[in-house]
Image: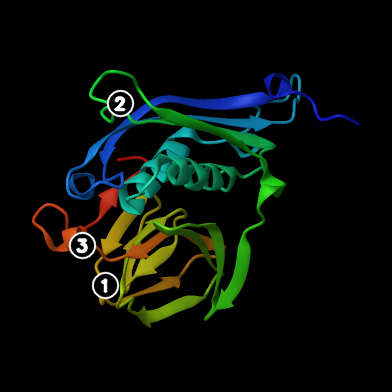
């Protein structure tokens, strides 16, 4: 049976997202943040009369926006093409009910000094690239994206599980808690809170809840700019989604 066209899906839209981040291949672009504009569209198979009965059957756009913003800020992408791939993989992993497709548009409005706005648009299906899954300590690590700029991972920690103190000497990492119940270095960590860690920083997690907890993790090589004022990763907590 032929697959229905995208406009026959039930869709969750996130349009006009804008943020300042490091993106680009030119030396100055590796030092100064610039704006990106993003549209995300996540499609589900049609369910007339049933779509929207429960959030678990759709997608929390607050959580989606926070996850995409987290990946963009910490991925420091060389190309917007790779940024779009990483965002699509993240969006496909964000929904409780697996979506049927995702469309991402990324625009770089400052790139051509106002003469035109360059951008890319991609559409991805869940089966296009199955995440690589590997056990590690008590946790399981799914690789959602593995590119020249960064890796985007989903770390799953079972109830009662722990990630012992660890360091990434040659890489900068950032973690976003997706579920309530985690403890970071013995302190409660609320869902929606993200941290960025410089290379060599040690931290440990445990799951004190009765269910699985997940982290969205971005790992990338350290850059010289990481040591410049205003560019070093923040060690304190930052909120990306959830109630204030």
Q: Secondary structure at mark 2?
A: loop
Quadrant location of the C terminus in the rendered image: top left
Q: Which mark is residue 109?
A: 2
Up-down relation of residue 135 to residue 72 (above or below): below
Residue at (27, 42) in percent of width and height: 21
Q: Where, by quadrant of the figure, is residue 72 drawn? A: top left
Q: Position of residue 13 (x, y in %)?
A: 52, 25
Q: Nearer the viewer, residue 28 or 70?
A: 28
* Residue found 65% across the figure and 52% down from its top: 129
Disc 2 + disc 3, Cβ < 8 Å: no
Disc 3 is placed on an element classified as: loop
Dot 1, how many residues are within 10 Å of its Cα: few (below 14), some (14-19), or many (20+)? some
- For label 3, the residue is 235
Q: Is residue 105 visible?
A: no
Q: Quadrant of the N terminus?
A: top right
Image location of residue 226, percent across then percent down: 19, 61
| Residue at (35% x, 22% y) in the render | 117
Q: Give the Cα distance between marks 1 and 2.
A: 32 Å
Q: Tell me the tag on residue 44.
A: none
- Residue toward you, 191 or 210: 191
Per the model, the C-alpha gap separating discs 3 and 1 is 12 Å
Which image quarter: residue 225?
A: bottom left
* Residue at the farthest right position: 1
- Callout 2: few (<14), some (14-19), or many (20+) C-alpha neighbours within 10 Å? some
Query: What residue lies at 35% left-to-right and 49% top-to-bottom?
Result: 78
Lateral position of residue 31 relative to residue 157, left or right: left
Percent coordinates x, y for residue 57 in the rendering: 66, 36
Q: Which residue is mark 1?
A: 199
Instruction: Report helix, strand or loop for mark 1.
Output: loop
């Amino acid at each position: 049976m032929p697959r229905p066209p995208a406009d026959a899906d039930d869709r969750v839209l996130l349009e006009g997202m804008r943020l300042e981040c490091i993106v680009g291949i030119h030396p100055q672009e590796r030092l100064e943040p610039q704006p990106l504009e993003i549209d995300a569209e996540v499609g589900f198979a049609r369910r007339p009369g049933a779509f929207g009965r429960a959030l678990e059957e759709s997608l929390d756009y607050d959580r989606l926006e926070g996850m995409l913003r987290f990946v963009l800020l910490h991925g420091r992408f060389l190309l917007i093409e790779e940024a779009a791939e990483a965002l699509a993989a993240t969006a496909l992993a964000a929904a409780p009910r697996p979506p049927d497709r995702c469309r991402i548009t990324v625009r770089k409005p400052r790139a051509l000094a106002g003469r035109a706005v360059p951008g890319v648009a991609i559409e991805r299906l869940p089966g296009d690239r199955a995440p690589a899954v590997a056990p590690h300590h008590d946790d399981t690590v799914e690789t959602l994206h593995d590119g020249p700029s960064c890796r985007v991972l989903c770390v799953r920690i079972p109830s009662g599980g722990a990630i012992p103190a660890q360091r990434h000497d040659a890489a900068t990492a950032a973690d976003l808690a997706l579920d309530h119940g985690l403890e970071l270095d013995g302190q409660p960590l609320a869902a929606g809170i993200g941290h960025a860690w410089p290379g060599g920083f040690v931290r440990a997690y445990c799951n004190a809840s009765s269910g699985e907890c997940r982290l969205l993790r971005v790992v990338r090589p350290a850059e010289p700019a990481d040591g410049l004022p205003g560019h070093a990763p923040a060690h304190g907590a930052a909120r990306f989604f959830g109630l204030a």
